[in-house]
Amino acid sequence: MSAAHTLAKRLKAGTVHVNTYHVFGAELPFGGYKQSGWGREKGDEVLQQYLETKSVVIAL
């Protein structure tokens, strides 16, 4: 678990999946980093266009 969180911090990606794939909840912010997207969709993050927020999804 610690290694997954450490790696997720280092990746420049909007969503990181660990032991799962393509799991998106309505409350999870979604959007690209750098030139991949124009801001965030879903969740509270839609209002905070200037932050780099990351979602980490881990299947236990």
Image (cartoon, rainbow, N blue to C red):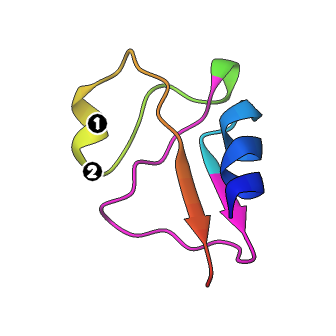
Q: Position of residue 26 (x, y in %)?
A: 32, 65
Instruction: Give the side of residue 55 with respect to residue 8, left or right.
Output: left
| The C terminus lies in quadrant | bottom right
The residues bearing labels 1 and 2 have C-alpha atoms spaced at a distance of: 6 Å
The image shows a total of numbered marks equal to 2
Q: Which residue position is annotated with label 1?
A: 46
**Residue positioned most to the front:** 2
Range of magenta residues: 16-33
- Residue at the location (66% across, 36% down)? 9
Q: Position of residue 49 (x, y in %)?
A: 35, 21
Q: What crowding class fits label 2: few (fewer than 14 Cα within 10 Å), some (14-19), or many (20 or more)?
A: few
At label 1, the amino acid type is: Val
At numbered mark 2, what does the secondary structure look like: helix, strand or loop?
Answer: loop
Q: Are marks 1 and 2 in contact (CB under 8 Å)?
A: yes
Residue 23, quarter of picture: bottom right
Residue 43: numbered disc: 2
- Residue at the location (57% across, 55% down)? 56
Q: Pick the residue in front: 54 or 60.
A: 60
